[in-house]
Image (cartoon, rainbow, N blue to C red):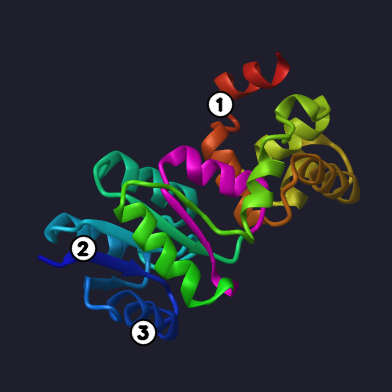
Amino acid sequence: MLTRIVIADDHPLMLFGTRLVIEAEGRYSVVGEAQCAEELLDLLATEVVDLVVTDFSMPGGKRPDGQAMLQALSRNHPKIPVVLVTMITNPTTLNMAMRTGVRGLVYKGSGVDGLRNAVDSVMGGGIYLDSELAPCLQEAGRERTLSVLSPKELEVLRLYVSGPSITEIAAQLRRTVSTISRQRLSAMRKLGISNDAELFAFAFEEKLGTPQAMATAGE
């Protein structure tokens, strides 16, 4: 019986190419495709699946993508291994993905061999790390934590991931917009985070903004 795989990516051409690579040798069968987290989770609720191959960022649908999606996969389908195919190289995000239970990491620029090797390794019970991403995970082991942030930087970051704009935060804290913007960027730089998508993934993982996260940061 062929191994049953569900693939997810918000770009139709990536889905087409992924299916071709996976089914090329006749050992695996793609039984479903999804273009957002909602479609992926709905598929898994109805299909018998042996492996998920998914992108990290897939905007659209009513369910969040990224780290929240990986958490939902781990929580709702703990026995289905996940191969993550991504362009992300940020150590924080990749480390969180592995901690969530991702078994294979593939860099989208690596070509077909990376995906094929990842599927083979994970279905064989192993873990696959793309050679392009392995150094990023090594860097993740040297990451700093929230404790490196100043109290004001942590305050700004906590508010920012909760929804208010930079202007609203400035008004609330009675600081200038430029000061709030500078403190946010400084905090992201210290954490090794380069954009808002990675920041919100980090905030989700660390429960940033809760009393527990504040207490941990102050230790």
Give 79 or 151, whichever is nearer the viewer. Answer: 79
Q: Is residue 109 visible?
A: yes
Give the residue at mark 1. Answer: 210
Tag 3: Cα neighbours inside 10 Å, few (<14), some, or many (≥20)? Answer: few
Give residue 15's quadrant in the image: bottom left
Look at label 2 and name its amino acid.
Leu
Please identify, in this view, whether the residue under mark 3 or under mark 1 is nearer the observer.
3
In space, the residues marked 3 and 2 are separated at their CA atoms by: 18 Å
Q: Is residue 27 above or below residue 76?
A: below
| Residue 22 versus residue 140 in the image, above or below | below
The numbered mark at residue 16 is 3
Q: Is residue 214 left or right of residue 18?
A: right
Q: Secondary structure at mark 1?
A: loop
Residue that numbered label 2 is attached to: 43
Q: Type of residue at label 1? A: Thr
Could you give the CA–CA distance between mark 3 and mark 1, rounded to whole angstroms?
Answer: 42 Å
Image quadrant in which the N terminus is located:
bottom left
Task: Name the side, left or right, on which 78 lies relative to 66.
Answer: left
* Element under disc 3: helix
Identify the magenta region: 89-109
Residue drawn at point x = 41 percent, y = 71 percent:
9
Going by the numbered disc 3, the residue's amino acid type is Phe
Q: Is residue 62 visible?
A: no
- Callout 2 secondary element: helix
